[in-house]
Image: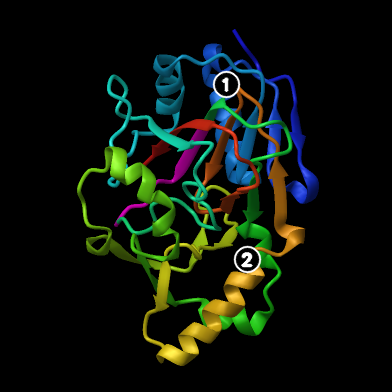
């Protein structure tokens, strides 16, 4: 049996560290993780030793592995997408604030990222912005204005250029312009009734039902608000760490400040 020893909340409760060996979780620890990810938005597990097989096994405690439409997964483990930056590359996959696969009709609820090869500590951090805090800190007039609004999310949004290198290597052939979806921009987590702002700056192209100029002005305000420093925790990677986050509750942004080889294994959960 392997019980969680401690949960260590990060600054402003944006995320939390959990001391646990993910190779030997039990039902009790999985339930604690489920509660914690709903409360904190993102969780961090250091000093892991996960094989691809055990990584997938752990991930299935939280739901069905989602298909990533843009890239082929590992040959023997198609559930795992390789997120890679090579030393000579300028752009990094996923660079820029976003939440994952919002252009699908049912975006993945959870994302897991496991570090295989990382630059020196302090470089290539991933920044996470709490959208619970983002929503809570909007004034009441804005909350009323956005309560019933929807946005268009597109795979051909601003972030699409960051996946060009990987798509050239192992793309599925799907045209990004063909993938788009409409979603509410305010989410309510049914587990704790917390509201969050659900907008992905890397994918959103417009607000539904607003004049273009009014929609663009509102999006500019909300995008800037979502990523205020007081809502952010920056996670320092090293090999064999797992970050797991609720895509409805946080944005993330990998920092492109290195010229070393970085390899991460990603799983998303429906």
Give the secondary structure at mark 2.
helix
Observer able to see residue 67: no
Identify the residue position indicated by label 2 in the image. Answer: 226
Looking at the picture, does residue 198 appear above or below residue 213?
above
Q: What is the x, y in percent for residue 226?
A: 63, 66
Could you tell whether 246 is left or right of 79 in the image?
right
Could you tell whether 46 is left or right of 262 in the image?
right
Q: What is the x, y in percent for residue 267?
A: 42, 34
**Is-magenta flag for residue 64?**
no
Residue count near mark 1 (Cα–Cα under 10 Å), binned few <14, some 14–19, many ≥20: few
Residue 90 or 47: which is nearer the viewer?
90
**Is-magenta flag for residue 106?**
yes
Identify the residue position indicated by label 1 in the image. Answer: 28
Residue 183 or 225: which is nearer the viewer?
225
Q: Residue at x 51, y 34 (%)?
A: 113
Magenta segment boundaries in residue numbering: 105-113
Q: What is the x, y in percent for residue 48?
A: 60, 17
């Amino acid at each position: 049996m392997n019980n969680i020893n401690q949960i260590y909340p990060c600054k402003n409760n944006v995320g939390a560290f959990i001391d646990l060996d993910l190779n030997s979780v039990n039902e009790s620890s999985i339930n604690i993780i489920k509660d914690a990810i709903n409360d904190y938005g993102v969780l961090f597990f250091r000093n892991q030793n996960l094989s691809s097989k055990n990584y997938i096994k752990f991930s299935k405690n939280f739901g069905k592995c989602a298909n990533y439409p843009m890239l082929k997964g590992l040959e023997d483990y198609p559930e795992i997408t390789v997120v890679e930056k090579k030393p000579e590359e300028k752009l990094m996959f996923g660079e820029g604030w976003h939440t994952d696969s919002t252009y699908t009709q049912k975006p993945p609820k959870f994302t897991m990222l496991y570090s295989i090869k990382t630059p020196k500590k302090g470089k290539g951090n991933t920044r996470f912005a709490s959208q619970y805090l983002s929503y809570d800190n909007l004034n009441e007039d804005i909350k009323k204005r956005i309560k019933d609004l929807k946005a268009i999310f597109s795979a051909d949004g601003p972030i699409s250029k960051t996946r060009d290198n990987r798509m050239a290597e192992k793309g599925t052939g799907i045209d990004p312009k063909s993938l788009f979806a409409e979603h509410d921009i305010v989410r309510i987590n049914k587990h704790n009734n917390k509201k969050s702002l659900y907008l992905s700056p890397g994918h959103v192209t417009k607000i539904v039902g607003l004049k273009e100029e009014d929609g663009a002005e509102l999006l500019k305000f909300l995008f800037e608000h979502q990523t205020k420093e007081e809502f952010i925790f920056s996670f320092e990677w090293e090999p064999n760490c797992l970050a797991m986050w609720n895509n409805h509750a946080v944005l993330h942004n990998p920092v492109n400040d290195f010229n070393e080889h970085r390899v991460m294994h990603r799983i998303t959960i429906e």
